[in-house]
Amino acid sequence: MLKVYGRKDSSNVQKVLWTLNEIGVEYEQLDFGGKYGNLNTLDYLTLNPNARIPTIEEDGFILWESNSIVRYLASKYDSGGIYPSDPQICANANQWMDWQQTTVGQYIVPLFLGLVRTPYEDRNIGVIEASRQGMIKVMQILDDHLQRNIYVSGNEFSIGDIPLGIVVYRWLKLIQDRPKMTNLETWYKLLVKRPAFKCNVLDIPFK
Ligand SMILES: N[C@@H](CCC(=O)N[C@@H](CS)C(=O)NCC(=O)O)C(=O)O
């Protein structure tokens, strides 16, 4: 059976678990990382030399990098479904996935670490505020895109919605002082209706 290495409260692991539930593939989830540790063992480093989660293993095939795992699973098990068959729609989904990692990540990661993982007295308010401002800027780009699109890559839910759905959940939960973004909230309400999003993201407490 396909193995997923990574604790359930990691946002990058959640992308993989959410995808697996969307496409109906059975898996075994193994608690690695965070309080479970075990990332710097020789065995784990052989799977993933970055000592990071998630990693998957399927019949001897090993893959790391959460967005690459989402693409692999969806293309293998749900091509034409959440992995769009139209090359341009698929490219759009990939574009927004890459944008999540490279552009949005630089703001949501310090915001999350500052507000969730850092004790109040140790927080760097300057970094938190700069990250909040950065998030407003990038969320407005997504909000504008969603004015013309029901989902990230068009009319259908796809892999493009998964990484950003997890980020937007954290953004809406962590920051109340933000401009209203109607299109983003309309899209987010569609995600909330998905059982795979609820059980792998909404129901898991922040850690
Ligand atoms: N770019 C990598 C980032 C992986 C990453 O940084 N994962 C975090 C968890 S979200 C991690 O391994 N942290 C160490 C830990 O959980 O102990 C990916 O998308 O998979």
Image (cartoon, helix red, strand yellow):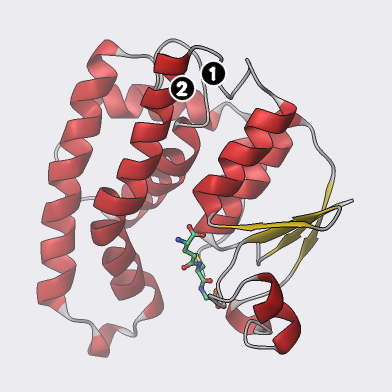
Q: Quadrant of residue 71?
A: top right
Image point 36% across, 43% down: which residue?
Answer: 98
Mark 1 belongs to which amino acid?
A: Pro
Image point 69% across, 71% down: which residue?
Answer: 47
Image point 59% across, 23% down: which residue?
Answer: 82
Mark 2 belongs to which amino acid?
A: Cys
Q: Are marks 2 and 1 in contact (CB under 8 Å)?
A: yes
Q: Quadrant of residue 55?
A: bottom right
Q: Residue furthest right?
A: 1
Asked whether 62 or 201 is in front, the reply is 62
Reading the image, the residue beneath label 2 is 90
On residue 84, which mark appears?
A: 1
Q: x%, y% of residue 73?
A: 67, 38
| Crowding at mark 2 (Cα within 10 Å: few <14, some 14-19, many 20+) | some
| Crowding at mark 1 (Cα within 10 Å: few <14, some 14-19, many 20+) | many
On residue 94, which mark appears?
A: none
Asked whether 169 or 61 is in front, the reply is 61
Residue 80 higher or lower than 168, as above or below: above
- Could you tell me which secondary element the residue under label 2 belongs to? helix
Q: x%, y% of residue 127?
A: 15, 72
Residue 111 higher or lower than 38, as above or below: above
Residue 195 visible in the current orientation: no
Would residue 125 appear left or right of 81 to someone viewing this image?
A: left
> What is the C-alpha distance between the residues marked 2 and 1?
5 Å
Would residue 14 appear left or right of 177 to someone viewing this image?
A: right
Q: x%, y% of residue 27?
A: 82, 49
- Could you tell me which secondary element the residue under label 1 belongs to? loop
Residue 121 visible in the current orientation: yes
Q: Earlier in the sequence, mark 2 or mark 1?
A: 1
